[in-house]
Amino acid sequence: MLRQPLEDGQVCVSRAAQSLTYPASFMLVAAMTPCPCGFLGDPQHACNCTPLAIQRYRNRLSGPLLDRLDLQIEVPRLAHRELAEPAPAETSATVRVRVEAARQRQRDRFAQKGVHCNARMRPRHLQCFCRPDAAGQTLLEKVTDRLGLSARSYTRILKVARTIADLAGREQVEVVHLAEAIQYRSLDRRMP
């Protein structure tokens, strides 16, 4: 039931007498364990799930819904040392400045286009603003063929790569941006 609202940004409620449409532009954030027992890929605990059980568990999320999730990231267990003594990282203020600059780039880019951010780009916008160079096109061709990506997954990769380029302050989507965006499609890569 989330597929259409994610795609269209609206919810249509139909009853016998009438149909109403409500705005529903939202960001979906979800989490799941990698398998029913939760230990698939864990270096400290053995997974006791069968491949069939893992497949059944993952099939609870439909392919069309997964296609609509822009970022699919695997989060491994952290060692106590990593939790107790985190590595130095950028401050939230520094990240905020970079994100605000990227959002401003998007507002400027789409000022007369009827969209406000990369996630809302239509196919015609992808042709203008997300066209990869020859190396990027070769990478996308290999990944699409190897993983059997849907057209929707392909366009999601382009949109995420455009955002990564914006965060880096780059005008063109480069192969490094595409490679990073592809890495954020872990469920496409990990299906057994």
Image (cartoon, rainbow, N blue to C red):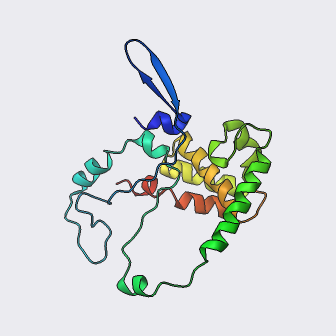
Asked whether residue 14 is in view, the answer is yes
Asked whether residue 175 is in view, the answer is no
Compared with 47, 117 (above or below) is: above
Q: Nearer the viewer, residue 106 or 60?
A: 106
Q: Would residue 182 be found to the left or right of residue 166 on screen? A: left
Q: Would residue 31 be found to the left or right of residue 24 on screen? A: left
Report the residue at 19% width, 64% height from top: 48
In the rendering, at what x and y percent does residue 170 appear?
76, 62
Report the residue at 38% width, 41% height from top: 62
Looking at the rendering, which quadrant does residue 44 occupy? bottom left
Q: The C terminus lies in which quarter of the figure?
A: bottom left
In the rendering, at what x and y percent does residue 63 appear?
41, 42
Looking at the rendering, which quadrant does residue 179 occupy? bottom right
In the rendering, at what x and y percent does residue 163 appear?
66, 56
Report the residue at 53% width, 61% height from top: 183
Q: Would residue 78 be found to the left or right of residue 144 on screen? A: left
Q: Would residue 148 be found to the left or right of residue 16 on screen? A: right
